[in-house]
Amino acid sequence: MTSPEYRIGLGHDRHRLVAGRKLLLGGVEVPFELGLDGHSDADVLLHAITDALLGAAGLGDIGDWFPNTDPQWAGADSTVFLQAALSAVKERGWQVVNLDCTIHAERPKLSPHKAAIKNNVARLLGVLEDQVNVKAKTGEKVGAVGRLEAIDADAVVLLGRSDTAN
Ligand code: MG
């Protein structure tokens, strides 16, 4: 007999919007006059998803794995972080059941980009598109998001595995 085991993980991230940087969301470059600042490529959504994966498997956080003081990760492609977290999770027998995420951005308008972001995140995770959901919210013109100072992202991931020991 096998009984399925499940673990849930939560991720959150924020990066500052600045001039002269690309805006990468879920590995997709979104055209905008501002981009996200950070040590790596500052893909706020991939960072939140990476943290959710690590959290679900009890593996700490992205800062433990990829310190932002380490010159090795300067300008790093955040898909590398996601792939490393995914590999660590899979090595422990876990599979992604589903991912839900929210991007908080006053601008640019993300509705034209949500499908491409969802498609790319599903591809990166090696899951079907219907296992991934991407939502977008504005900051209602208040707070750091509303004042165009930052973009935030939240992610929740469910992992599952068959417990063959039982
Ligand atoms: Mg980050």
Image (cartoon, rainbow, N blue to C red):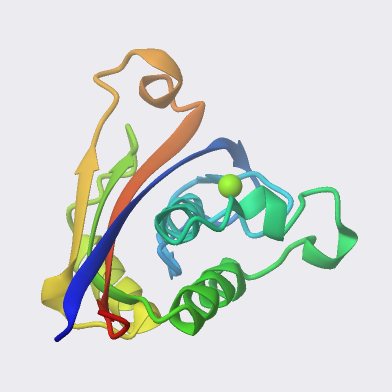
Position of the N terminus, as image quadrant, is bottom left
Horizontal and vertical percent for residue 137? 22, 36
Residue 37 placement: quadrant = top right
Residue at horizontal 46%, vertical 52%? 55
Residue furthest to the left? 130
Horizontal and vertical percent for residue 61? 59, 50
Residue 91 is left or right of residue 18, and the answer is left
Residue 121 placement: quadrant = bottom left
Residue 73 is left or right of residue 25, and the answer is right
Residue furthest to the right? 71
Depth check, front residue: 4 or 70: 4
Image vertical order of residue 130 relative to residue 157, above or below: below
Horizontal and vertical percent for residue 40? 69, 57
Residue at horizontal 61%, vertical 54%? 62
Residue 95 is left or right of residue 3, and the answer is right
Depth check, front residue: 37 or 133: 133
Image vertical order of residue 57 relative to residue 19, above or below: below
Residue at horizontal 45%, vertical 61%? 57
Position of the C terminus, as image quadrant, is bottom left
Residue 123 is left or right of residue 118, and the answer is right
